[in-house]
Image (cartoon, rainbow, N blue to C red):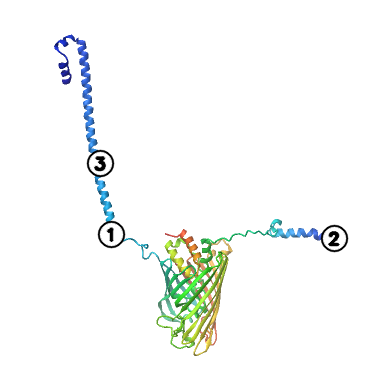
Amino acid sequence: MKIQKIILLVAPVLLGVCLMGLGLTPAQAEPEKKTDQKAAPKKLTGAELYAINCNRCHPERYATEFTTAQWQTIMLHMRVRANLPAAQAKEILKFLKEDAGN
Amino acid sequence: MTLAGGVLGVALTPRAAAMISDEDFNALKSAVTNQDSRIGQLEKLHEQDQQTHQQDQQTIQQLQQRLGETQTLATNAEQKAEETAAKIQPAGPLMNALHNFTMVGDAEVQFGQAKGQHGTFTLADFAPIFLFRANENILFEAGFDVVLQNNTDPTTGNPNGGSSTSVSMSFGQLDYFLNDYVTVVAGYMVLPLGTYSERAAGWLNKIPDDPLAVDFLPGAGAGAQLRGAVPVGISGQMLTYAVYGVNGPSSIDGTANATALDLGGNVGDSPNLNGNPSGGGRIGWFYPWKPHYDVELGVSGQTGTWSGNYLWSALVVDASVHISPYVEVKGEYINTWQQTANVGNIQPGGWWVQAGYKLAGLNLDAPIVNDVELVGRYDTANDAMGSTTERTTAGFVYYFTNTLLLEGDYEWLANRGLNANGLPSSQFVVQLSYGF
């Protein structure tokens, strides 16, 4: 009986210490309530697609380095060379054209 | 006064004059005199008004004259504009024929020193890529390589004296964007055997020289290709494909001896002697879980005959991983099969793995350190004709800007086998690379 009482007293304390160690409050440590509403997947922006794809093979080029017309040509070249999906290439182009050079 | 006298002469008879007192006469005279004075003033004012009126009339005439001149000028200008417009041909949608012309590419200068040799500038390379966008669906692109190189044997380091300049077309292809998922490519194409050949410009590769085993593959081929990508979801994940037919490798001397394989000679002076084109392709999967965190896997291959009915085939497995903006690991496994007339079936091949770490990831407040990337590579190649080479490379990349790089590497080489050549045991290579 003594052992059971000790366990009952010590166990919550140990659990609390563990949670504090993880930086969690008891409320946060509760399992997440299941909800029917899933977070809607967010479509990637041109800037995000630029960060994902361009830096894989070469240092990122600044939008101001080429004119709008040049970016249109270069993005066709990169669409072939890097095998980029058309929709992604178009979003990246839109992003680059926003700050394209003169 | 005359008027006043007239008035008095008419208005007053002698009898009436006798009846008017002097006082009245004087009063009347004074009144007449005042009226006379006022009439004089009115006459002066009238004269001034007339002068003003005349001046106004002159001013109006001048203004009317100017207005007429202005109207004449306007009419003439309008007529001239109409005449000029009639002479000008209607402008098309493209005002400048070179409007859609763009040049990109890279340039390198390399310095090297093999162990036991003097250091020397080994090459200068200018590699422009000309791009012409005919419209939104058609792109023509051609890449050239202009290299000035010492006539030093690259394998032995033995100088032969002098230098040579070579100009070659790396690729020249027409791209037709059929739809969002299919691009038709035709011409002399960079081949998608692995990813290295398509991403190997001097300022892209972080180590100045190519992996050894890449030499077992053709870099480009003459033919046609279908390629494209299919996005999977909206997270940036995609499946890529490329399928092509090319002339394929040939023989440099018409024989099927092992050393006669000509991977680059599938057009021009060294025609394909077998008449059967080669086919190949690549399937790739790219999965980014967030920007700068991704994995890419690919399998590619090519098969066909190279001399008569002798087969040549290749298989390449490529992989790359990015973990944060600072860590990159990539590599390729390459194996080829070659039927020969003199040594039977051989399998030249090899593999390479390369890693890089950008010191900016250490978050040190040190500008120069933050612009440094440490790189290392291990590569090996077995030519299946009695020579196996292993190479370990350690070096750095210093980024002056996003397009100007200084690459420095030290390489340890080991060449073994019955036909081992005299490669230096180690060498130091420095390269300045610029991408434009």
Distance, label 3 to label 2, CA atoms, is 121 Å
The picture places residue A93, in percent across and down from the top left corner, at 47, 63
Q: Which residue ends up furthest to the right in the rendered image?
A: A1
Badge 1, how many Cα within 10 Å: few under 14, some, many 20+? few
Which quarter of the rendered picture does the N terminus of chain B lie within? top left
In percent of width and height, residue A9 lies at 80, 58
Decide: is B267 above or below B72. Answer: below
**Mark drawn on residue B87:** 1
Image quadrant in which you'd find residue A68: bottom left
Looking at the rendered structure, whether the residues under marks 1 and 2 are on a common chain is answered as: no
| SS for dot 3 | helix
Image coordinates of residue B26 in percent, x first then y, are 20, 13
Q: Identify the subunit bearing mark 3.
A: B
Assess disc 2: are there few (<14), some (14-19) or many (≥20) residues with their C-alpha within 10 Å of its C-alpha. Answer: few
As rendered, which of B402 and A45 lies closer to the eye?
Answer: A45
Q: Check contact, mark 1 vs mark 2: CB within 8 A.
A: no
Kindly indicate whether the residues beneath marks 3 and 2 are on one polypeptide chain.
Answer: no
Total marks drawn?
Answer: 3
Mark 1 residue type:
Lys
Q: Is residue B339 left or right of residue B166?
A: right
User: In this picture, is B41 found above or below B190?
Assistant: above
At label 2, which amino acid type do we have? Lys
Q: In which image quadrant can residue B224 be found?
A: bottom left
Residue B392 appears in the figure: no
For the question of whether residue A21 can be seen, the reply is yes
- Distance of label 3 from label 1 (alpha carbons): 36 Å
Q: Which residue is mark 3?
A: B63
The disc, 3 or 1, on the residue closer to the chain's N-terminal end is: 3
The answer to whether marks 3 and 1 mark residues whose Cβ atoms lie closer than 8 Å is no
Horizontally, residue B32 falls left or right of residue A39, namely left
Report the residue at 21% width, 10% height from top. Answer: B23
